[in-house]
Amino acid sequence: MAVSTVAKKLDAHTVRADFPIFEQEIHGKPLAFLDSAASSQKPRQMMEAMTAFYSTSYANVHRGVYVLAERATAALEGAREKVRVLLNAPDVREIVFVRNATEAINLVAYSWGMNNLGPGDLVVVTELEHHSNFVPWQYVAGKTGAKLAMIPLDDQGELDLSTLDSIAAKGNVKVVATNQVSNSLGTINPVERLATWAHEQGGIFVLDAAQSAPHMTVDVQALGADFVAISGHKMCGPSGVGALWGRGSLLSRMEPFLTGGHMINSVRLDKTTWGDLPHKFEAGTAPMAEAVGFGAAIDYLNAVGFDAIAAHEHELAAYALGRMSEIPGITLYGPPAERRAGIVSFNIDGIHPHDVAQILDMNGVAIRAGHHCCQPLMQKLGVAATNRASFYLYTVQEEIDQLVDGLATVRKVFA
Amino acid sequence: MSEFDQMYREVILDHYKNPHGHGVLDPADAQADGQNPLCGDEVSIYVAFGEDGETIDEVKFSGRGCAISQAATSMLMDMVTGKTATEVAVLDKQELLDEIAIPLTPVRLKCALLGLTTLKVALHKAKGTPLPDGLAGFDELELT
Ligand SMILES: Cc1ncc(COP(=O)(O)O)c(C=O)c1O
């Protein structure tokens, strides 16, 4: 997330006013919400778009011949186009609405993986993966006889790419699946290089952009990815909707993931034919209002500007790392500020993250404590859990100060 | 007292810093490992029965966890020593919670009860006593 020199500056206090959640106190203290990497808070504009959709345009999409069904269809397809533009995808038919990034990755792991993997093949993931981009591959590799290989981390929490040759020697690299930004350490991964490497090996490159898309421009064409997964709820959208982008040439040759209503071309007793893209992958009633909210969230983020968001978070990460490094007994995980997104993972000597998070909560500070769905990474770090503070466009410096003050209280309790 | 002082009251911190029954029994008459999937914490419980093969003579725990889970398990070790497997299997979790006596949110309740749940699983495996609430009723549970 390089700091763009042309980025207009973001005024987080102004942005914050769009987020009603901050109009409350927690335990009598202002809310310092430092858990946006798990899920972001929601701007009024997004919620209003969903309410307007329900109030004026709601009906089941497609097929209906009446006005409301047409309006609802236009709203859903309008949201799809917004996702296409967000990701700079070549064709809107390559955008599949799913529930979340997890479902998007499962779609690829099942529909592509089950039919294209076998003994002798390698699925390459990294030690930095979220369980969402690890477990589906582990599972499908197990079912197909393919092997799972891991790109290890170096001491800085960055991928050790010097291992790529030795990994390639272990089998046919068929899939390389990595995240663009690690939800645990904030590491920004060199995904263009990995995409190139995957293609050199004759494999596909699957990008988990759940944690990057909220914060930076994700251009599927520039990255050279084959599949990209995102979640709406992490980027100011509602829960329950995410998107998969897939290269049309791959999607069109894939089997469906879920079958049933809407995803068909024709159904006969002896044979069913699949619908066109993206419908082949959208069985059942779509998350219509959620997609509309997702579209509105994308509009909101575009209005603020992704360069400004990235620069703001970078500034906060540098500030937090500076202030927190002065705390006695703290271990900070992950790369230097220049190469990380707005995420700081840490531990305090001898104090369990649950206890840290609990005491912080009593100070109005919400952070996450746990394995962050990254147990392979926790094993690598030699801990069961870490504390994680994460920032977004509405995060203000005062919240980080509140965190640092809270950590002083934590140390006092356990002194 | 503030909610905060209650939660990390002195007795909790004492048990956390100097846990009772911390260690391993090898061999053990009953043993089980429990995990808290929310945070990755792990606890292992080891039981040695007395001459009658029923009464808990010695019980120990190892593993890692937060102050609440460690203190609760430490208190549990005191509570169950000298009780029979059957008595412990039906021990109401409220008894342990009364002993801990701090306000617990649902997530922290899982921390506080990890030791008790794991102990009941250990007794179930060794003696066939009833499984704890929430685990009972499924035939093909994989118990570790
Ligand atoms: C890097 C990364 N990948 C995948 C996911 C899964 O997202 P979801 O739970 O929305 O499917 C997350 C969310 O925690 C994440 O941070």
Image: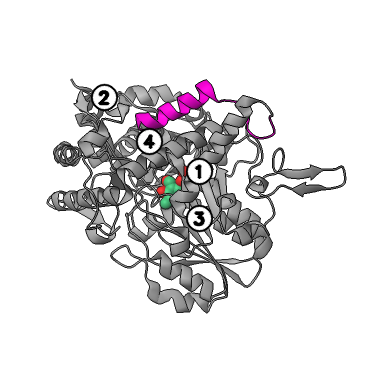
**Residue that carries the numbered disc 4 in the rendered image:** B111
A261 or A144: nearer the eye? A261
Percent position of residue B72, x then y? 34, 33
Mark 1–mark 2 contact, CB under 8 Å?
Answer: no
Quadrant the C terminus of chain A occupies: top left
| Mark 3: secondary structure | loop
**Residue that carries the numbered disc 1 in the rendered image:** A242
Q: Is residue A275 above or below residue B69?
A: below
- Which subunit holds the residue at mark 4? B
Q: Image check: B77 left or right of A170?
A: left
**Residue that carries the numbered disc 3 in the rendered image:** A89
A74 or B86: nearer the eye? A74
Colour mode of the rendering = one colour
What is the distance, in whole Å, between disc 1 and disc 3 at their CAs?
15 Å
Q: Nearer the viewer, mark 2 or mark 4?
A: 2
Mark 1–mark 4 contact, CB under 8 Å?
Answer: no
**Residue that carries the numbered disc 2 in the rendered image:** A23
What is the distance, in whole Å, between disc 2 and disc 4 at their CAs?
31 Å
User: Type of residue at label 2?
Assistant: Glu
User: Type of residue at label 1?
Assistant: Gly
- Which subunit holds the residue at mark 1? A
* Magenta residues (range): A43-64
User: Type of residue at label 3?
Assistant: Ala
Quadrant the N terminus of chain A occupies: bottom left
Q: Which mark is first along the chain, 2 or 1? A: 2
Evaluate whether label 1 is on the same chain as label 4: no
